[in-house]
Image (cartoon, helix red, strand yellow):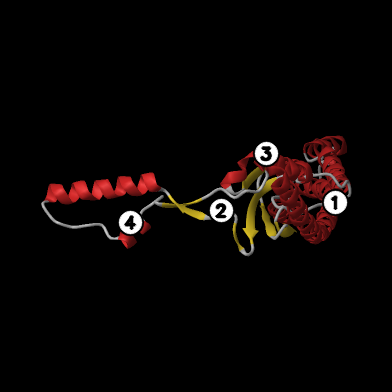
Amino acid sequence: MIKSMTAYGRGESSKDDTLYIVEARALNHRYLDIILRVPKNFLAIEKDLKAMVSSRIKRGHIEVFCEIQNHGGDTTGSPYLNEAMAGAYLEAFNQMAKALGVEQKMDLNTLFQMKDVIIARPAQIDNDTVKACLEEALNKALDQIEAMRLREGDIIEADFQKRLSVLGQYLEEIKKRTPELVEEYRKRLKDNIARMLNDIELDEMRIAQEVALLAEKSDITEETLRIDSHLGQFRQYLSSGDPVGRRLDFLIQEINREVNTVGSKISDPLVSRLVVEMKAELEKLREQVQNVE
């Protein structure tokens, strides 16, 4: 059972006519990267909310947006006049008018639109209430993310299993072809020598030595055993239930290295084609693994 790294979730909680909304989305990332945004009046609870996320998600880029609404509005608080700022703007305007030698007064609408003249009074909601309600909403959002990641993980795993079977088939074809190549080489070598020597008796011992030398150079027993082992380990990781994305990525690199070695050891059109096909399947696996937790 594996999990995708892309998902979306939304959760809500309410208390005393206040609605707490948490939206979260998960994206691909090599490590765990959490970005969490809460209303600035409640930054003290950000650390606890991040800890909740990291306890349930081990890999990926996670963005969490927390919103608090009171009777359908924002709880940043009721607006009030910042008299000091308004006075400063008015004084600066008058100084500018005097310096330019113009008689102009700042109208109320212009003053009202100046930055920080009207500001929001901090909402009177205690942190404990906010923390409890946002945690409840966050849990609901994470539940949705978990369900979506599992569903997509099942789809990815099915694709993995199919490609692992294809890789296994290609590997069996290569293993079957290897002894045929040695026999073909022995026959080709014997025929070539016979044509050159005409009626001279062939040195079977020498031919056997040459064939043995080729067989040793083109022996891929170790490589095929390791590929078989890696494919089996890949399947075990898929059923482990643990975050295995990085381990699967490493296994794909190892399999690819062994396949390259096989291709370099054996010069044969059929084996070369099979090696190319295996590398193509491995590349598709590698792309998919980037989305696995």
Locate residue 183, reporting x and y percent.
Answer: 85, 48
Give how far apart the Cα atoms at labels 2 and 3 are.
Answer: 23 Å
**Which one is closest to the eye, mark 3 or mark 4?**
4
User: Which residue is labeled 1 in the image?
Assistant: 180
| In contact (CB < 8 Å): disc 2 and disc 3 | no
Q: Nearer the viewer, residue 71 or 28?
A: 71
**Which one is closest to the eye, mark 1 or mark 4?**
4
Residue occupying the far left of the picture? 101
User: Which residue is labeled 3 in the image?
Assistant: 47
Q: Nearer the viewer, residue 228 or 146?
A: 146
What is the secondary structure assignment of the residue under circle 2?
loop
**Which one is closest to the eye, mark 3 or mark 1?**
3
Give how far apart the Cα atoms at labels 2 and 4 are.
Answer: 21 Å
Name the residue rendered at 62%, 48% in the picture. 124
Three-letter amino acid code of the residue under disc 1: Glu
Q: Nearer the viewer, residue 177 or 221?
A: 221
In primary-sequence order, the first of circles 2 and 3 is: 3
Number of disc labels: 4
User: Which residue is labeled 4 in the image?
Assistant: 111
**Which one is closest to the eye, mark 1 or mark 2?**
2
| In contact (CB < 8 Å): disc 1 and disc 2 | no
Three-letter amino acid code of the residue under disc 3: Lys
In primary-sequence order, the first of circles 1 and 2 is: 2
Residue occupying the far bottom of the picture? 72
Give how far apart the Cα atoms at labels 1 and 4 are.
Answer: 91 Å
